[in-house]
Amino acid sequence: MKKLIAFDLDGTLAESKQRIGDPMAALLAQLLEVAHVAVISGGDWPQFETQVVAALPAGTQREKLFIMPTTGTKLYRFEQDAWTQIYADVFAPDERDHILQALDTATQEAGFADETIWGERVEDRGSQITFSGLGQEAPLDAKKAWDPDFAKRKAMQVILRKALPDLSVNIGGSTSLDVTHKDIDKAYAMRKLTDASGIATEDMLFLGDAIYPGGNDDAVRAAGMDTVAVRDVEDTMTAIRAIIACLK
């Protein structure tokens, strides 16, 4: 029986950058009654706070919830009635400056400089710097249409990996690329969970909507951990109901 159920966020628990719905929030609260739960995504803490934490119903067992922003390079736990940062693997100032310069150059070389954008394109999340092709505030329909086959981001990824050989450059959500320290992915986050929770990876299960070659959830499967591929939020809700029934 699994002791910890981990989830991707966007496309799995909620639409991109949207608050989880009340039915999903209720299901997560029910799941927390029978297991520990983790949510892992490339977004930073404020995004998790808005999308997940604020949506949970009163009485939710928050002490059993692990919030892992920036692909697990940060961890937040609910301790002494407050959400507390447990760790954060942040960039040094010189690393940050080098990454920002590389992103600016790569944007020009990949031909994205003249794209219509909504909001800032580059977000410094401390332990992760994220490039969003259409900007941080792009509408969902535009984001889904921009790079559905990953071709645009793969081209920019090649440029960035040459410029930043000592760092990881991975495809993130529907329009994003994430730059982190080396070998950071969701399998890394799952391994960090073993340290934080004392639960072995074989006692964990990960659910995500991008568990396929090239998908940003696939590192968990590739690392030999148990996964469930879901198509969308509704599919995730069906899976959670089944998991709760099995664990009760």
Image (tube, helix red, strand yellow):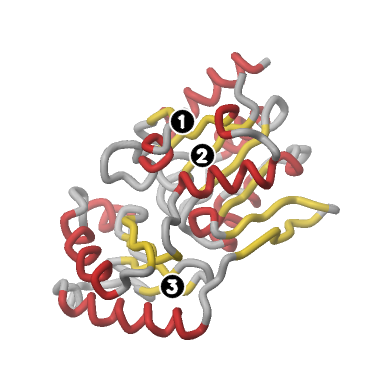
Q: CA distance from mark 1 to mark 3?
A: 28 Å
Which residue bears the numbered disc 1? 236
Number of numbered discs? 3
CA neighbours of label 2 inside 10 A, class few (<14), some (14 to 19), many (20+): many
Earlier sequence position, callout 1 versus callout 3: 3
Mark 1, mark 3: which one is toward the viewer? 3
* Amino acid beneath label 2: Phe
In the image, residue 125 lies at what x, y percent?
Answer: 51, 70
Which residue bears the numbered disc 3? 123
* Amino acid beneath label 1: Thr
* Depth order, front residue of 173/99: 99
Mark 2, mark 1: which one is toward the viewer? 2
Find residue 45 and name its label: none
* 81 to the left or right of 171: right
82 is higher (above) or lower (below) than 105: above
User: Secondary structure beneath disc 1?
Assistant: helix
Earlier sequence position, callout 2 versus callout 1: 2
State the quadrant of the N terminus: top right
User: Secondary structure beneath disc 3?
Assistant: strand
* Depth order, front residue of 94/238: 94
In the image, residue 58 lies at what x, y percent?
Answer: 75, 41
- Contact flag, marks 2 and 1 (Cβ < 8 Å): yes
Which residue bears the numbered disc 2? 7
Q: Quadrant of residue 178?
A: bottom left
Q: CA distance from mark 2 to mark 3?
A: 23 Å
